[in-house]
Amino acid sequence: MPSDSTTTLTKSGYATRDAAPLQSKFGRKNPALLLSLGLVSLLSLTYSCGALAATAPPLGSASNFAIVSDTFTNSGNPTIITGSICYTTPPSTAPTTVTGVVKTPCDTEIADQGIALADLDSQLGTCIPLGSAVDLSAVVVSGGTPGVIPPGCYSSTGAMSVGSTVTLNGSGIYVFRPGAGATTAALNTAADSIVSLNGGACAGNVFWAPTAATTLGANSTFIGTVIGNAGMSMGAGATLSGRALTSGGTVTTSANAISLPGVCAAPTVPSITVSKISNGGVGTFGFSGSNGFANQSITTLASGSAVAGATQTLTAAGVSTSITEAAPPLGYTLASISCTGLGSGGTQTNDLLTRTVTLDAAATAAGAAIACTFTNNLDGFVPPSTIPSLSEWAMLFLAGLLAIAGFAAIRRKGL
């Protein structure tokens, strides 16, 4: 029989390791525990890699259209469309309201849809692979909360779905690619599911490009522009803040509301300031980094006093970024790295051996003003001792009296 194994997702793919010891230790005596562990690992998909930067595709003439399709079918009213629509085959029942133009057929809009889709195809290499048949509600990015997703490009080889709630968190571009590398992969949302925005996320910066049809569940709330050639079906009561650019397929509505997203402010890229503290002496310390951080040197002027380098603007938000201190002057050893101003839920990982701090994608969220302090100690440096204050001496004296009283009570009882 083939041996059992567990699978761990890494940024580059899947690496397996033998799980037979785990089964022999727990499985025979407690199969229920082993089953529970397996279910938890399946339902909580964690992706430790940071989201990679994405760019918005050019929509051209299609930007003002809420619907671009070969066939438009409206099976129930009230259907309210805020924006323009175009199609080749019209619906037998007209929607209740269309605030923009109604155009037939779509010509330049179809061409511009194709240009936008080609642009998204060119970004596939920067997408984080989420595996196959992914429920975005369960995805954990960079140790965050399930279903809370920072800006970036995400792909799957199978269908993508929204089973409950997905929160797009942070100012930036979001691209979702169901079916990357596969023949067909759908985009589906469950009834009453919700895609929401937080932390400066904007509906006009969200893009979905499935290779199969999109189905929005009844009474669901969905956000973003869907670009594909396989059509979209909206369940009764579903709402879309975005666009259905699906020429090549059919758009079906049923008492829905579709509204063009508003204009998004340009995402604010994060900044970072590096400060240097040298204890026991002074010196010049060099720093380098990624994500647009330019090399810089900082010279300390007095032992124990911080000196800040020039504030730098990073190239992109939502991208894992590292800052490294060069080999320090002779006799100095890096003692600590402390960073503040990280984006919501962001974390730092220190490696004192390589003198590097790594900030995850959430830490470098748009608008974050990050400040990192590197502290070095000169060989032989001894931190100054702390002399207790008068109130601290009083507490020490009281603690001593209580200890003596307790000891005397024990002696009286003969213990």
Image (spheres, helix red, strand yellow):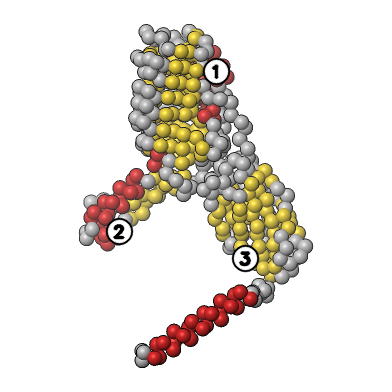
| Residue 64: mark | 1
Q: Nearer the viewer, residue 214 or 240?
A: 240
Pair 1/2: label in front: 1
Are there few (<14), some (14-19), or many (20+) residues within 10 Å of tag 1? some
Q: Is residue 140 visible?
A: yes
Q: Position of residue 40 (x, y in %)?
A: 33, 49
The disc at residue 2 is none
Which badge, 3 or 2, is on the more N-terminal residue?
2
| Residue type of the residue flagged with mark 1 | Asn
| Three-letter code, disc 2 | Leu
Q: Quadrant of the C terminus?
A: bottom left
Q: Is residue 257 left or right of residue 287?
A: left
Q: Which is closer to the viewer, label 1 or label 3?
A: 1
Q: Which residue occupies 71% across, 70% down?
A: 280
Q: Residue at x 48, y 8 (%)?
A: 104
Q: Nearer the viewer, residue 402 or 49?
A: 402
Residue 39 locus on image (x, y percent): 30, 47
Precedes in sequence: disc 1 or disc 2: 2
Q: CA distance from mark 1 to mark 2?
A: 57 Å
Which residue is under mark 3? 335
Dot 2 falls on a residue whose secondary structure is: helix
- Give the residue at the far right of this rendering: 301
Question: Would residue 122 be seen by someone viewing this image from the given angle?
Answer: no
SS category of the residue bearing label 3: strand
Q: Is residue 378 above or below residue 241?
A: below
Residue 188 relative to residue 174: left or right: left
Q: Residue at x 45, y 25 (%)?
A: 240
Q: Which residue is at a point 76% across and 65% down the rendered structure image?
A: 302
**Between 60 and 367, which is closer to the camera in this rendering?**
367
Q: Which residue is mark 2?
A: 22
Element type at mark 1: helix
